[in-house]
Image: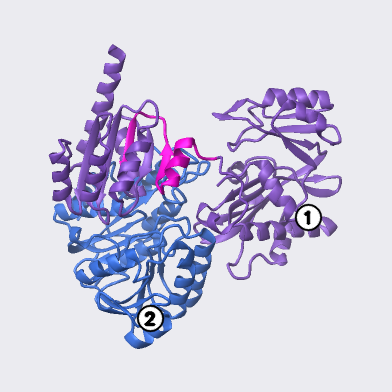
Chain colours: A purple, B blue
């Protein structure tokens, strides 16, 4: 789960990491109520990256100017995400920008610290243009991230004296937050030198979805669309896409390959939906309801390979809630004969071959588009 | 011969009295697996499918000589179950459980390395050596013994491809399901090392997907060490960046983890990459 900057900074402040004084507002008039030292920076709170380039971050010298900035930014569309809140913070006079993050290093199976004296830009860019400017250190799963490791990283960034110790404290605290809060990414970019001290000017925090159950008082998850949230409630993994063929399959890899299959035959998937291993008739029924709620869906492609999932269960779910748009069904594997018979008895056609199923689904969506165009 | 599991495997099932654990224990027994013990804290002294159940792994191992473990417990208990199995030096420890917190997986994988134990998973379908042993949930009826080693990050996609291989008359030595999580115990490279050294495996199928760089690392390893034919398929070519596609590990972050990048890396290493899962069997057949 991705958090907004202001939410990440609330975590930061709670752990004692240095952040600017500021407040979150939802209406421009609220600027007048803020007790802040001017100039201030007005920052759009969105989960997508690149808000600065999109005009979502502006400096303001007076309350009046800040209000105007907030008015312009609130309601803005940044890469498809509407701005509903802005963070107003006291502007910092930045002397130098650094980068510091803890991430899950998948290849190492460990947590890694990544730091650079080239802050304020995307770390991926630095990794491509000047990889030697990136310092890396792995945390031991049992020892954590001892201060000496932070000191080694800090020296590589060029810190000395009191500033080095300040960096060590920040790195150790960020690691503590990362581990305790089950984060997947905790990033400070830039970690800025301001008036001789280090300050977390921007903050990014991504929490592990699998670990949310063991944390209380979590902020609301704003990453999901309405349909995605509805699917999640039913334990279904659903991702909204922008095509017109609804997809239901079992197993993440198979569903991903189903999207690719449709593209291969010239179609476009409206969604990703994994009904999961051992999907019941009920799950199938719910899945059919959810995928067809998305506007613009012209056909459904159901691609089931029964392993633990039983084809008869899937067929019962389909019969209970038959698709309202033309459907192509591929049903094979465990209890295939029973499943095929249940569908046949209900007058629903189903095949065994995934490629043929995808081809048919693409054709059905095309026919649907024509009919609609002809009306 | 086979890799990771085979006729020598004496399996202990953790979570054997649960819905999934009991169901799959039945199927594993049917497939010829020697399931010698089960563990569910609080259910010691009972039996499931006539397999004795114990409260702790320690007791179970002493009583039955179990040497491998399969874990079906719910996500919030999976860390403890895995650590318990590793502490008793069961090897491999195959974790089927989906939804395990990543930090728990980091601790489990770290402890396993320290103790010299192989972990497979979490969030995978397990390991199957056709005709000998099934550890996990793969539908054995699709398989037949033969020369193709298969390693995959996805369950159903594995079944789909295995069914295609079997239909084409190509049996399998072992199928290894690595799991769909960001941090897993066994990587593509480790599975490739095993298949490369296994005299019965004459060709290797690698099924990858978006997210991370495990396929790129596999490509580097193949180029340097593998002389057996390798055929691959990568799912998620049309997946958008930044969205988690079902598996916790299947997400393109920034420019890292795209299917195109993985396919390019594999092809550069001499691997034939199928456009569709249905194309895998023919590519294997042509190279055997």
Which residue carries the number 2 mark? B44
Magenta stretch: give its range: A223-248
Snapshot quadrant of residue A21:
top right
Residue sitting at 86 percent across and 48 percent down? A196
From the top left corner, tell me how far across and down residue A164 is, in percent. 79, 58
**Circle 1: is it few (<14), some (14-19), or many (20+) Cα within 10 Å?**
some
In space, the residues marked 1 and 2 are separated at their CA atoms by 58 Å
Dot 1 and dot 2 within a common chain: no
Q: Is residue B238 left or right of residue A64?
A: left
Q: Is residue A229 magenta?
A: yes
Q: Is residue A326 left or right of residue A73?
A: left
Compared to residue B147, the image places residue A44 above or below, namely above
**Circle 2: is it few (<14), some (14-19), or many (20+) Cα within 10 Å?**
some
Residue sitting at 19 percent across and 69 percent down? B131
The circle on residue B286 is none
Compared to residue B220, the image places residue B253 above or below, namely above
From the top left corner, tell me how far across and down residue B151 is, in percent. 32, 58
The circle on residue A159 is 1
Quarter containing the N terminus of chain B? bottom left
Quarter containing the C terminus of chain B? bottom left
Which label sits in the foreground, 1 or 2?
A: 2
Q: Nearer the viewer, residue A77 or A23?
A: A23
Chain letter for the residue marked with disc 1 in the picture: A
From the top left corner, tell me how far across and down residue A31 is, in percent. 78, 30
Residue sitting at 16 percent across and 44 percent down? A342
Q: Nearer the viewer, residue B20 or A241?
A: B20
Element marked by disc 1: loop
Q: Nearer the viewer, residue B222 or B104?
A: B104
Compared to residue A359, the image places residue A230 above or below, namely below
Chain letter for the residue marked with disc 2 in the picture: B
């Amino acid at each position: 789960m991705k958090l907004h900057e202001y939410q990440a900074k609330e975590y930061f402040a709670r752990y004692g990491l240095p952040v600017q004084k500021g407040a979150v507002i939802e209406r421009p008039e609220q600027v007048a109520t803020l007790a802040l030292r001017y100039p201030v920076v007005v920052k759009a709170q969105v989960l997508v990256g690149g808000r600065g380039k999109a005009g979502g971050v502006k400096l303001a010298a007076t309350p009046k100017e800040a209000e105007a900035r907030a008015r312009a930014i609130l309601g803005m569309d940044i890469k498809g995400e509407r701005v509903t809140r802005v963070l107003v913070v006291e502007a910092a006079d930045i002397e130098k920008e650094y980068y510091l993050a803890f991430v899950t290093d998948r290849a190492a199976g460990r947590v890694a610290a990544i730091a650079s004296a080239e802050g304020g830009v995307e770390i991926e860019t630095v990794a491509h243009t000047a990889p030697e400017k990136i310092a890396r250190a792995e945390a031991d799963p049992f020892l954590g991230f001892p201060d000496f490791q932070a000191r080694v990283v800090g020296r590589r960034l060029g810190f000395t004296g009191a500033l080095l110790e300040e960096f060590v404290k920040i790195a150790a605290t960020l690691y503590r937050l990362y581990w305790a809060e089950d984060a997947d990414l905790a990033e400070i970019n830039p970690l800025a030198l301001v008036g001789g001290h280090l300050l977390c000017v921007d903050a990014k925090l991504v929490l592990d979805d699998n670990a949310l159950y063991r944390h209380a008082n979590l902020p609301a998850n704003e990453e999901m669309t309405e349909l995605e949230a509805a699917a999640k409630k039913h334990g279904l993994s659903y991702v909204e896409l922008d095509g017109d063929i609804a997809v239901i399959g079992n197993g993440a890899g198979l569903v991903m390959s189903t999207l690719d299959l449709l593209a291969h035959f010239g179609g476009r998937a409206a969604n990703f939906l994994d009904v999961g291993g051992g999907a019941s008739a009920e799950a199938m029924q719910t899945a059919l309801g959810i995928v067809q709620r998305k506007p613009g869906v012209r056909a459904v492609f159901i691609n089931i390979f029964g392993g633990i999932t039983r084809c008869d269960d899937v067929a019962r779910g389909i019969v209970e809630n038959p698709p309202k748009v033309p459907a192509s069904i591929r049903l094979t594997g465990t209890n295939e004969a029973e499943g095929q018979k249940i569908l046949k008895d209900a007058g629903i056609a189903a095949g065994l071959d995934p490629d043929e199923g995808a081809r048919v689904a693409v054709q059905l969506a095309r026919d649907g588009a024509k009919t609609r165009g002809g009306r | 011969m086979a890799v990771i599991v085979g006729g020598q495997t004496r399996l202990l099932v953790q979570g054997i009295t649960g819905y999934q654990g009991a169901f799959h224990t039945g199927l594993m027994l049917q497939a010829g697996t020697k399931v010698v013990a089960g563990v569910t804290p609080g259910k010691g002294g009972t039996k499931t499918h006539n397999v004795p159940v114990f409260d702790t792994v320690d007791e179970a191992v002493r009583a039955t000589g179990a040497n491998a473990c399969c874990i079906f417990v719910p996500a919030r208990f999976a860390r403890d179950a895995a650590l318990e199995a590793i502490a008793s030096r069961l090897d491999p420890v195959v974790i089927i459980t989906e939804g395990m917190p990543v930090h728990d997986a980091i601790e489990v994988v770290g402890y396993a390395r320290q103790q010299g134990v192989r972990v497979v998973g979490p969030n995978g379908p397990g390991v199957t050596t056709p005709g000998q042993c099934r550890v996990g949930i793969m539908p054995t009826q699709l398989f037949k013994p033969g020369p193709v080693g298969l390693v995959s990050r996805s369950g159903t996609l594995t079944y789909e491809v295995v069914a295609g291989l079997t239909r084409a008359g190509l049996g399998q030595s072992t199928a290894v399901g690595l799991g769909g999580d960001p941090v897993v115990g066994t990587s593509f490279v480790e599975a490739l090392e095993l298949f490369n050294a296994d005299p019965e495996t004459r060709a290797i199928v690698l099924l990858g997907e978006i997210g991370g760089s495990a396929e790129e690392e596999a490509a580097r390893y193949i180029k340097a060490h593998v002389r057996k034919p390798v055929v691959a398929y990568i799912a998620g070519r049309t997946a958008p960046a930044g969205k988690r596609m079902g598996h916790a590990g299947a997400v393109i972050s920034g420019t890292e983890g795209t299917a195109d990048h993985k396919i390019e890396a594999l092809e550069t290493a001499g691997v034939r990459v199928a456009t569709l899962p249905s194309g895998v069997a023919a590519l294997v057949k042509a190279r055997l």
